[in-house]
Amino acid sequence: MKSYIDLIQQSFEFPTMEFNVEDNQLLFNNVPLMDIINEHGTPLKLTYLPKIGEHIENARMFFRNAFKRHNYKGTYTYCYCTKSSHFSFVLEEALKHNIHIETSSSYDIPIIRELYRTGHITKSTYILANGFKRPLYTQYLSELINEGFNAIPILDNLKEIESYEQLTNAETVNFGIRIATDEEPNFAFYTSRLGIRYNDVLDLYKEKIKPNPRFNLKMLHFFINTGIKDSAYYWSELTRFMFKYCEMQKICPELDSIDIGGGLPIQTSLTSNYDYQQMVDEIVENIQWICNKNNVPVPHIFTEFGSYTVGESGAVMYKVIDKKLQNDKELWYMIDGSFITHLPDSWGMNQKYIMMPINNWDNPYQKVNLGGLTCDSQDFYNTEMHSSDLYLPIFTEDETQYIGFFHTGAYQESLGGYGGIQHCLIPAPKHVLIDRDEEGAIVTRVFADAQDSESMLKILGYGRDRAFVEKKMEKLQEEPRPEEVAEVEEKGAVAKKAEKRQLIQK
């Protein structure tokens, strides 16, 4: 029977730039994963920080090459959308590469202020503020604008601009408008609930932006929920958007930028083979062709890449803790974690990831199902992107099997409720950051230990009165017991009666 490594090598072009096998064990970006497991145990989350900068610089190269090839006269600006992962280690690593930021919530703004306080950004850093904005969000943005930050609210509804009319006092306030695109044909709705209808964009500019001497429309925002794809749907929506840009630019000369939301795809299977350069070339070529056709200058291009920035930096590793044959043909490998809580995209959206064993690559393989620890019947993983079956090495009772899920770095912690209460009280796993020093040597540090029961009890309210109870117990221990008090009182009463009798006798 063939070994697992034979299966992989006959199914894919393997090894890859990212994955390799040495001594029967898997390497991820040349990091020996068994060494990490032996030190930190499982379940375990990893973030390989150099991958973040690698993707940022690759995207810049793709656009630089496309601009040169097509003699494109605009500029390119890379923004990271924080909703993909708000963690400090992600933003600080990305900001080392001179990027800019896209936000989606009022609670992003305190993060912006902290990054400014620590010197990771300056007031010239672009802050593209997306999302449906409630009063606190518009208040925070107005404060940033008044203080001279380069914040650009992307208007999402017709009334939003009224907040900036009341709250801003800066000489110039730059705006973007998010246009409500049509959803993918198989989506539940025809048009996105976010953004402003095509038919309302011109009126919004004429009635609310143009009459105000402090206001400028600088950007139109294009967002496709599926991300950039080489599909008729994507190119049709981009073309429609660009014709609207040209229409608006003719009456609004200060409009000079577009934001292409919905980023480049990431690899979710070893079969994924995206030609990123070709995708970017076609985007730039289409934008330029439509602008030339309409005799307007080409716009500066902003992108807001989230999953592409951080997704491929992440991995989750588990130990197989049991094998269960539930009928004649369904074999379950039970893991020491949960897909519902640790990889919620795999459960909620049927998202697939690159899944491979960490060890035992020379062992023969078999078809398996992977089961999580929760009591929910949906806590399983049994197919891959390229196959309806899942295969892993066969291992004996005296062997231990570890498995890994890769390219999990975007959204999982926020969707799973990091550090909070999750299904069946499954704790958040330990999280280790992997970096390289100036000589290229591997450096690791623990970002967070595994969640403990104390933190869960506190969230659930069981620890709220603990301090009060402890103080009460200490006080009771210092005070005499009730029976001792009664004894003292009884002795005092007897003494008083004796004293009274003595007075009467006198």
Image (cartoon, helix red, strand yellow):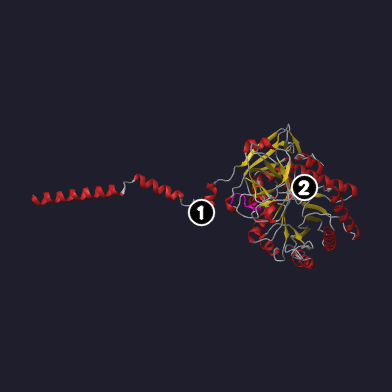
Q: Is residue 97 left or right of residue 44?
A: right
Q: Position of residue 477 (x, y in %)?
A: 36, 45
Look at mark 2 in the image and give the residue it sits on: 269
Q: Is residue 217 above or below residue 395?
A: below
Q: Main secondary structure of the magenta part?
A: loop
Q: Residue furthest front?
A: 328
Depth check, front residue: 467 or 302: 467
Q: Secondary structure at mark 2?
A: loop
Name the mark nearer the viewer: 2 or 1: 2
Sequence-first tag of 2 and 1: 2
Chain part drawn in magenta:
414-421
Q: Is residue 217 above or below residue 452?
A: below
Query: Which corner quadrant of the image does residue 227 belong to?
Result: bottom right
Q: Residues within 10 Å of mark 1 (few under 14, many from 20)?
A: few
Q: Quadrant of the N terminus?
A: top right
Q: Residue at x 42, y 50 (%)?
A: 469
Look at mark 1 in the image and give the residue it sits on: 461
Q: Is residue 297 left or right of residue 196?
A: right
Please, what is the three-letter code of the amino acid marked with disc 2? Ser
Q: Is residue 415 magenta?
A: yes
Q: Residue furthest top?
A: 439
Please, what is the three-letter code of the amino acid marked with disc 1? Gly
Q: Position of residue 498 (x, y in %)?
A: 15, 49
Q: Residues within 10 Å of mark 2 (few under 14, many from 20)?
A: some
Q: Secondary structure at mark 1?
A: loop
